[in-house]
Image (cartoon, grey):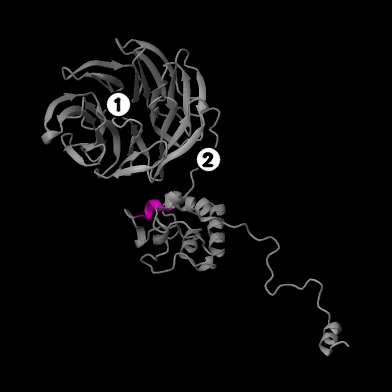
Amino acid sequence: MIAASSLAQDANPAPANPAPANPAPANPAPAIRFADQVAPILQENCVACHCAKRAEGGYRLDTIEQMLKPGDGANAPIVAGKNQESEWLQRIRHTDVSLRMPAESDPLAPADIAIVASWMDQGANVEGCSPTEPLWSVIPPKTYAKPKDHYPNAIPVTALLWSPDGKQLYSSGYHEVLVWNVETGALEGRIANQVQRIYALRWNADGTKLYVGGGQPGELGEVRRVDRATGTVEAVILRAPDVVLDIAQPMNNSQPGKEEIAVALADNTIRLVDPNSGVTRKTIAVHADWVTQVAYSNDGLRIGSSSRDKSAKVIDAQTGELLGSYPGHAAGVRGIAAIDNGLQWVSVGADNKLHRWEVEGAKKIAEVPLGGEASRLFRDAGTIWIPNADKHWYRFEIANNAIAQKQAGHEDWVTSISVLANPALLATGGMDGSIRIWNSADATPVRAWSSKP
């Protein structure tokens, strides 16, 4: 017997494929990932004006925790599921340039606005990112686009490094490291997938790995580890909110079996990093402005640092303890180098002078005038090599506190320098993109070329 209820159902048969109560869109929008897609837009366009140092309108978005809090206007910056009610979207879409964000800049690209709006409409999910970590740290390391085959203009040579065998010279490029044949000046290799601007090149202890440091000013700093044999990036071993300006390594490893580098950053810190694991052992904040160079004493036990805050400092390489500070330049300090085991140091800066000083009591030992503002120093045994803005490079002899050589040859500032012991060669790079090779014994020119591919 058939139940009455069944007869009723048969009288009004249901569709074979009943429609859901809330039908899904035929082509749902792809899920937007905060770390990969939204955070980079904010970091590049917004964080500089809305961070701990400069919270315009009382609003910060340098961390997830901060970006959820209203600014002075008390309006909700993010309303999940309702992008039209979100202060963010109202501001970045505004037609009044006095109210539109980013302020005093071009408006965001329509594609970027669409990404932010879709992310909000999808629930503003941050996918488990730490709410208190800096925004830049949740962004995955980039794979940078392949550089152009030919540069439209030469760019300053901000970093130089000899290959361990002296047959090649490595120089800073744009999103790449350029590898030159020293005999011919011909371009032999291009190590791509690097940060925009490169300021530091350093070999590991056995010369098989290259550490490349640089970044995008005010946005990102990185150190990438490159395999010398293949030219491939193996790892990003340090990331920071501002540019890496220098990398140093002990001349003599005071801790056998443990490799460490010191990194100078434009976020005013020094980081001590294990370049194999990428672990930062210590972050040292003893400066109030950019740290422009770091250098180890001969025994590897002390680290000297120079800074735009008009000081040079010495710290204990193991503990990070401040051992001494030298304020004698009264101007930004651009470079530093140790004498022997770091009881004395040499520094240069915007006062156009070289200072030799003792850590104990910050006592000045000697002061030597230079023809212009010097930058990062290169120490070689008893000699300090100095690139200078007066279009010369200098050789300072530690033994007699004197300039032993002042050599012209560049058409613009000398911005970088590297020394090879055997054969005795010196390489210098210029603001105009030129590279020059010299005999370091008598300063005779050997070869010159433009670093422009």
Instruction: Name the mark nearer the viewer: 1 or 2.
Output: 1
Q: Nearer the viewer, residue 444 or 410?
A: 444
Instruction: Relative to 89, say whether 44 is above or below.
Output: above
Q: Quadrant of residue 203?
A: top left
Q: Is residue 48 magenta?
A: yes
User: What amino acid is found at the position of numbered circle 2 in the picture?
Assistant: Thr
Res. 221 visible in picture: no
Left/right placement of residue 313 relative to residue 30 reads left
User: What amino acid is found at the position of numbered circle 1 in the picture?
Assistant: Asn
Instruction: Relative to 370, say whether 279 is above or below.
Output: below
What residue lies at 50% left-to-right and 68% top-to-bottom? 85
Pinpoint residue 329: horizontal percent, then vertical percent: 18, 34
Q: Quadrant of residue 253?
A: top left
Q: Which residue is mark 1?
A: 252
Q: Nearer the viewer, residue 171 or 360?
A: 360
Residue reaching furthest to the right: 1
Q: Which mark is residue 143?
A: 2
Write the start and end of the magenta stretch as one range: 46-51
Q: What's the distance in space between the residues labelled 1 and 2, CA to CA? A: 34 Å
Q: Is residue 122 magenta?
A: no
Pinpoint residue 35: horizontal percent, then vertical percent: 50, 53
Q: Secondary structure at mark 1?
A: loop
Q: Secondary structure at mark 2?
A: loop
Pinpoint residue 16: horizontal percent, then vertical percent: 82, 72
